[in-house]
């Protein structure tokens, strides 16, 4: 432990309050020998001697006298050294660590020695999170409370590294939480890990980056909410990012655990996919396949899981799934070391703006000053009101996760959700502009805010603006936005484009599979992902209504369309016909809506 000449080794200046003259409080002469013993133990790295010296000093000082600050410093360091040495029974030691930290917090506060206060709260949260005695549920709640207290002092603008470390710990607390809704806890954990990654850069803080990506991947892998296939895709992307740092040469055991987690997620994703679509999904997961093959852990794949046929979201992984992985891999490796597929995709990432900096492109964010609902402190979150999907695939992911308008208070760590309008610009799409108004806005406000955002989009597009964009705005409520953000909403139930509905009715109500094949050949719109979504929705409604025949028929027709996209129309229908005469099939009434 290096110190400047004349600077005491212990206690640290951050553990000393200021005296009336503005100087750090001094240790009385009669206690200097005991303080010197502590300093000697620090220099010699003698943990047991340090524990003995600190305990002697604590026994000589009152907790509420003029030297309460020194008593608190000794309690804090007792907790710290116990956490390193672990003498005796693990559970007994852990309880003593918690008592020591809580004792120090009788003196320290956000106003008195704030740096140490935040450090103790962070370490106290860690102690509660691994505690086995008492109620596991209550221990996790205590850990979350402690992390949130630490974040009242550890702010991103003044202590970005400490803030990010505590955000990662808070994410672990939410991920392990048993109280409340599991899906909500997973969403809070994901938001905390993502916050940590805003600071923990792959180059600047590689170990923390790997830790955050690992924790985020495990949370997605176990996430009980949302779409299972997409959660597994996101988990694999995070594991790949972590493996950029956790190499077999530098971190053999951690590398091994990450590879096994990646293999588990890959196996589950493929088994969740109907067999006719597996080849395309595996091809889209090329970086995962290559990593597993290199590690010798390419898993055996079993038959499709029972839930595979009932999912409406089992198309290919999002095209931007590996954007962050490829960008960060490029930053760590020269371009010559990347394969052709990665090199072709890496280049555009260099122009993608970092989150937290207003984009110079089309995407546009605002910084409204707000007061935290928990600690009442003011902060200015970055909230996007215009998102260009081609420019910011990361924001599209936040829209799908329903956290695009969430922000974490930098003071206490509470996640807040803001009710704001959002305009999504999708160049080259049949529906290029989607508007999602603020939930609590009335109709007049929705129209005014929508017009303002369209005008802002016009200004940001400049010469690329087309007046037809203003006439093609599709309005959707926030609960539906996450579904339609990467689809053509006009083709979905309730949309004004009836072409898919008409083609679907013909397809479902053909008397034979030969007739159905001709319908699909005439209406290529049935091979779009929107058609899968319509049939998936229909199967779920039939299941909810208890109509097993209709559910089975929907699933059968859905499987045929998936096979058409995988092996071609003729090959897909060949499996449904016997080659002799007409092969009749079950028909349905037209889908309502």
Image: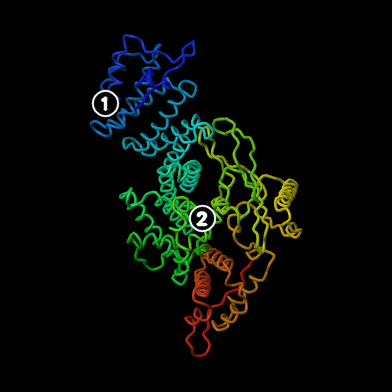
Q: Nearer the viewer, residue 491 or 582?
A: 491
Badge 2: few (under 14), some or many (20 or more) residues near its Cα, within 10 Å?
some
The location of residue 590, given as percent across then percent down, is 62, 72
Is residue 308 something one can see in this rendering?
Answer: yes
Viewport quadrant of the N terminus? top left
Q: Residue at x 37, y 34 (%)?
A: 128
Badge 1: few (under 14), some or many (20 or more) residues near its Cα, within 10 Å?
few
Q: Is residue 214 left or right of residue 315?
A: left
Instruction: Reply above or below: 288 against 362.
Output: below
Q: Residue at x 51, y 71 (%)?
A: 562
Marker disc for residue 44: 1
Name the element at disc 1.
Answer: helix
Q: Nearer the viewer, mark 2 or mark 1?
A: 1
Marker disc for residue 491: none
Instruction: Reply above or below: 16 against 126.
Output: above
Name the element at disc 2.
Answer: helix
Q: Quadrant of residue 67?
A: top left
Viewport quadrant of the C terminus? bottom right
The location of residue 396, given as percent across then percent down, is 57, 53
Q: Nearer the viewer, residue 380 or 307?
A: 380
Instruction: Reply above or below: 289 against 507.
Output: above
User: Which residue reaches farthest left?
Assistant: 88
Q: Are marks 2 and 1 in contact (CB under 8 Å)?
A: no
Mark 2 sits on what residue?
323
Instruction: Reply above or below: 291 against 10.
Output: below
Question: Label 2 vs label 1: CA separation?
Answer: 48 Å
């Amino acid at each position: 432990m290096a110190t400047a000449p004349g600077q005491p080794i212990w206690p640290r200046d951050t553990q000393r309050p200021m005296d009336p003259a503005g100087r750090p409080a001094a240790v009385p002469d009669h206690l200097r020998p005991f303080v010197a013993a502590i300093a000697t133990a620090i220099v010699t790295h003698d943990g047991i001697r340090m524990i003995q010296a600190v305990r002697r000093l604590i026994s000589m000082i009152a907790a509420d006298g003029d030297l309460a600050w020194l008593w608190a410093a000794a309690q804090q360091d007792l907790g710290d050294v116990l956490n390193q040495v672990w003498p005796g029974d693990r559970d007994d030691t852990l309880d003593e660590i918690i008592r020591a930290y809580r004792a120090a917090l009788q003196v320290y506060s956000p106003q008195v020695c704030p740096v140490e206060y935040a450090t103790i709260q962070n370490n106290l949260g860690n102690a509660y999170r691994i505690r086995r005695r008492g109620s596991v549920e209550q221990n996790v709640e205590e850990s979350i409370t402690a992390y949130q207290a630490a974040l009242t002092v550890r702010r991103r603008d003044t202590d970005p590294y400490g803030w990010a470390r505590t955000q990662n710990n808070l994410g672990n607390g939410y991920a392990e939480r048993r109280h409340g809704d599991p899906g909500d806890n997973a969403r809070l954990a994901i938001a905390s890990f993502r916050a940590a990654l805003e600071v923990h850069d792959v180059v600047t803080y590689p170990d923390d980056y790997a830790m955050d990506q690992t924790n985020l991947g495990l949370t997605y892998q176990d996430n009980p909410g949302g779409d299972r296939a997409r959660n597994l895709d996101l988990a694999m992307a995070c594991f790949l990012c972590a493996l950029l740092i956790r190499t077999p040469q530098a971190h053999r055991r951690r590398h091994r655990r990450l590879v096994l987690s990646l293999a588990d997620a890959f196996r589950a994703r493929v088994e969740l996919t109907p067999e006719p679509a597996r080849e395309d999904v595996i091809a889209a997961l090329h970086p995962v396949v290559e990593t597993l093959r290199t590690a010798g852990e390419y898993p055996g794949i079993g038959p499709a899981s029972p839930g595979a046929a009932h999912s409406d979201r089992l198309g290919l992984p999002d095209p931007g799934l590996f954007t962050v992985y490829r960008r960060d891999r490029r930053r760590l490796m020269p371009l010559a070391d990347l394969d052709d597929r990665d090199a072709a995709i890496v280049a555009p990432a260099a122009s993608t703006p970092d989150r937290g900096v207003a984009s110079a492109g089309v995407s546009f964010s605002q910084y409204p000053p707000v007061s935290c609902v928990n600690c009442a402190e003011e902060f200015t979150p970055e909230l996007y009101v215009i998102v260009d999907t081609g420019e910011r695939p990361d924001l599209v992911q936040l829209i799908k996760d329903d956290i695009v308008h969430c922000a974490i208070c930098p003071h206490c760590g509470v996640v807040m959700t803001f009710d704001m309008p959002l305009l999504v610009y999708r160049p080259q799409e049949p529906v290029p502009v989607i508007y999602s108004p603020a939930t609590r806005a009335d109709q007049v406000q929705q129209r005014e805010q929508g017009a303002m955002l369209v005008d802002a989009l016009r200004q940001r597009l400049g010469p690329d603006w087309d007046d037809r964009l203003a006439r093609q705005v599709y309005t959707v409520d926030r609960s539906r936005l996450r579904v339609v953000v990467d689809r053509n909403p006009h083709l979905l139930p309730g949309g004004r484009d009836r072409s898919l509905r008409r083609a679907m009715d013909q397809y479902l109500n053909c008397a034979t599979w030969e007739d159905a094949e001709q319908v699909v050949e005439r209406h290529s719109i049935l091979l779009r992902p929107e058609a899968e979504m319509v049939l998936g929705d229909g199967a779920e409604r039939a299941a909810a209504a208890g109509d097993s025949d209709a559910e089975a028929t929907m699933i059968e027709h859905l499987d045929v369309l998936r096979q058409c996209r995988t092996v071609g129309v003729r090959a897909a229908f060949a499996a449904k016909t016997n080659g002799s005469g007409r092969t009749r099939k079950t028909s349905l009434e037209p889908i309502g809506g």
